[in-house]
Amino acid sequence: MLPVVDTHQHLWNLDQLKLAWVDPKSAEGKILAHNFTPTEYAKATEGLNVVKAVYMEVDVVPEHQQKEADYLIGLCKSGKTVTCAAVVSGRPNSDGFKKYAEQFKGSKYIKGIRQVLHVKDTPAGYCLDEKFVKGIQLLGDLGLSFDMCVRPAELPDFTKLAAKCPNTRFILDHCGNGNLKHTAAERDQWKKDMTAIAAKKNVVGKVSGFIASAPERGKAKIEDLAPIINHTMDAFGPDRVMFGGDWPVCLLGVEKYADWLNALKAVVKDRAEEHQKKLFHDNAVKFYGL
């Protein structure tokens, strides 16, 4: 069994961190409005040979960002779990961003920053705001990466952002949020935009999270997933793709973590073993310096 590095591990304790986007009364909240700790993660990945994990920020309220970062540094330092590095929350266009980000320069554990931008209240063109761009350029100066979590229609804007920030390394989350509910026309446009952003050599693609867009939980078939996975992998090439579990958010689309991992393995099973190893392990180790 191939060793797996999960580059998109979510953890949260709702008694300690506030996640404004998790509504216990919603259908999603019934699945996600619980504590998901390293203990639950270990159970979810048991027997799957997940050897390392990179924590991915969980869109905490801004006043809890430092608290999140401090917790992750402590968790990584402890060596008691597979979590060995983290991408933490940040707002690149905020007044205090420079001071906040500078503390992570040269960190063994904090590898990058993410701000979730695929939400309804993000204005169109937000990522091209001059102040935002300068914040992203700062990350490059500090040796930190930025995760792009975007609405599919705004992939062209993020292609422009990557061009404006050539010294910053980007990770495009969730196959650019290729959506399992897309129409044929929407899918064609997504493919064109993915090809364009993949042409930027400072961007890598993360094969993760889009499973959450499944029309019905647990019902997505391999043939539904394959076009999104294969186009992402072909566009970015074998050296610029990484696996992400997106647990527990992936549970919106599958019953358990293993269902997503095994589905991805089924899609890529005919690719060269070397390329599979890069997807599931080697590229992440190299990119994050694990």
Image (spheres, rainbow, N blue to C red):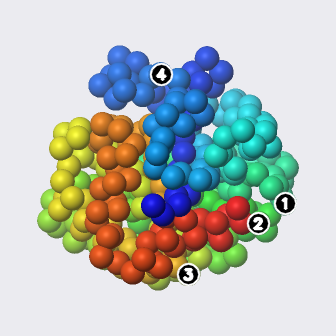
The residue wearing badge 4 is: 34
Q: Amino acid at mark 1?
A: Gly
Q: How far apart are labels 2 and 1 at the CA level?
A: 7 Å
Q: Disc 2, disc 1: CB below 8 Å? A: yes
Q: Is residue 152 left or right of residue 86?
A: left
Q: How far apart are labels 3 and 2 at the CA level?
A: 16 Å
Q: Residues within 10 Å of mark 4 (few under 14, many from 20)?
A: some
The residue wearing badge 1 is: 106
Q: Amino acid at mark 2?
A: Gly
Q: Amino acid at mark 3?
A: Lys
* Most foreground residue, 27 or 5: 5
* Most foreground residue, 175 or 261: 261
Which mark, residue 143? 2
Q: Nearer the viewer, mark 2 or mark 4?
A: 4
Name which residue lies at 29% across and 63% down: 266
Mark 3 and mark 2 lie on one chain; the one further toward the N terminus is: 2
- Residue 21: x and y, percent? 47, 30
Q: Amino acid at mark 4?
A: His
Mark 1 and mark 4 lie on one chain; the one further toward the N terminus is: 4
The residue wearing badge 3 is: 201
Q: Is residue 47 left or right of residue 224?
A: right
